[in-house]
Image: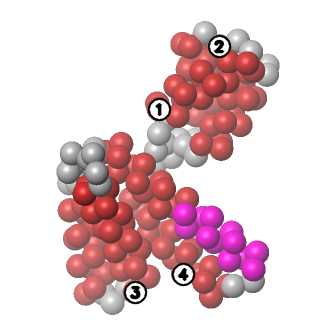
Amino acid sequence: MSLELNINAEIKTAMLGKKEADLRALRAIKAAILLAKTAEGSSGELTEADEAKLLQKLAKQRKDSLEIFRQQNREDLAVKEEEELVVIERFLPKPLTEEELRAAIAEIITTTGASSPADMGKVMGAATKQLAGKADGKVISALVKELLNK
């Protein structure tokens, strides 16, 4: 089932269950999907990779807002962001464990022929494409640095 159909079904369920936080997050996802489908230059359909990227973007926005609200002692707003983040994360693909991620990056390093920290750009380009939706960019970057500095 496509993400859009899944979200529409979840919206109906949230409405019937009167789950306000779920409904808020689901509507945000639906709006993002509609914007992506109608954006200039788009084909009108989203691939699974596009859907994962879109969900990651929404999750990152919530995490950033959550951090800012906590710094400013706005717990009322932080709670809303956290509730929405939990709902968005239900639809994200399962992230890789650190061991799986480390193995995948090591494989990418050998495939690209990287040998020093100067080759980080080459490795990061391949890693972000291959691991899109499965790991956070900051974590990927940190592991690439660590493995190239060995």
Q: Mark 1 and mark 2 in contact (Cβ < 8 Å)?
A: no
Residue indicated by mark 2: 114
Q: Earlier in the sequence, mark 2 or mark 1?
A: 2
Q: Mark 1 and mark 3 in contact (Cβ < 8 Å)?
A: no
Q: Earlier in the sequence, mark 4 or mark 3?
A: 3
Q: CA distance from mark 4 to mark 3?
A: 10 Å
Residue name at image x 26 percent, y 47 percent: 42
| Mark 4 surroundings within 10 Å by alpha-carbon count, few (fewer than 14), some (14 through 19), many (20 or more) | some
Residue indicated by mark 4: 80
Task: Look at the image and tell me whether residue 103 can be seen.
Answer: no
Q: Secondary structure at mark 1?
A: helix
Q: Is residue 3 above or below residue 105?
A: below
Give the residue type at disc 3.
Glu
Give the residue type at disc 4.
Lys
Q: Main secondary structure of the magenta part?
A: helix
Q: Secondary structure at mark 2?
A: loop
Residue name at image x 28 percent, y 51 percent: 40
Give the residue type at disc 1.
Lys
**In the figure, is residue 85 to the left or right of 93?**
right
Q: Tell me residue 100's x, y (percent).
A: 56, 33
Among the 4 quarters of the image, the one containing residue 80: bottom right
